[in-house]
Amino acid sequence: MTTQDRFAPPPAAPEIEGWTSERVARALVKAFVTLDRLPRARGPREPGGHWPRHAREWGDELAAAELDEAERREREERARRALLRPTGAEISRMDTALEWLRDLRAADAGLALVTTLWALRAARGHSVTALMREKSWAPHTFYRKRAKALEFIARALNARGAAVF
């Protein structure tokens, strides 16, 4: 073995070709994140946007400093999300992923409901446990149905030869 062989990087692991349930899950969550970043449709403005913007005063800074860390991170994330608009490619991938949910709904509406609500909650950073509690769903059944739905979508995409993104 030569010195060059010893310091050569190891061969890259072969990339799994096609769609997997994990890739489908990431694409669905990303689709809902992109959907939330789109500009709102015409109509009434969101509450709080009616007054002109003003400079923050010292009292505002003190009140913000007293917020707990979770609330502060949530507000910063909401402000950042509103500023960054999705690209055309992100919107195209979002449309494609939401189309998968429509196809899943035609095959099994229950699986589509579980998967859609899960992806929406995951995209917004909300608790999936709270979702299961609200809907009175057993965790084992919820995760089994979600896994079945993601695998169904992955198999359908691989059968069609859909491009992986």
Image (spheres, rainbow, N blue to C red):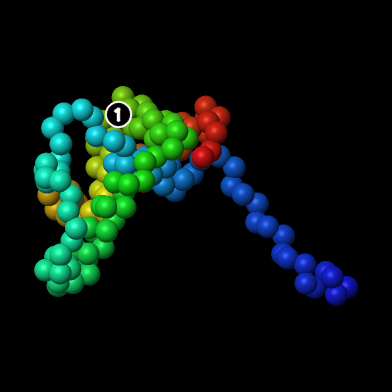
Residue 41, visible in the rendered structure? yes
Residue at 27% over, 52% down: 79
Say if 62 sits above or below 155 in the image.
Answer: below
Residue type at tag 1 = Arg
Q: Position of residue 28 (x, y in %)?
A: 37, 41
At mark 1, the secondary structure is helix
Residue at 35% over, 32% down: 98
Q: Position of residue 156 (x, y in %)?
A: 46, 31
Q: Is residue 121 left or right of residue 33?
A: left
- Determine which quarter of the picture holds residue 59: bottom left
What residue is disc 1 on? 105
- Determine which quarter of the picture holds residue 116: top left
Residue at 68% over, 57% down: 12
| The one of 127 and 16 positioned closer to us in this rendering | 127
Say if 99 sits above or below 142 in the image.
Answer: above
Say if 143 sits above or below 98 in the image.
Answer: below
Q: Position of residue 160 (x, y in %)?
A: 52, 27
Give the residue at the far right of this rendering. Answer: 2
Residue 93, visible in the rendered structure? no
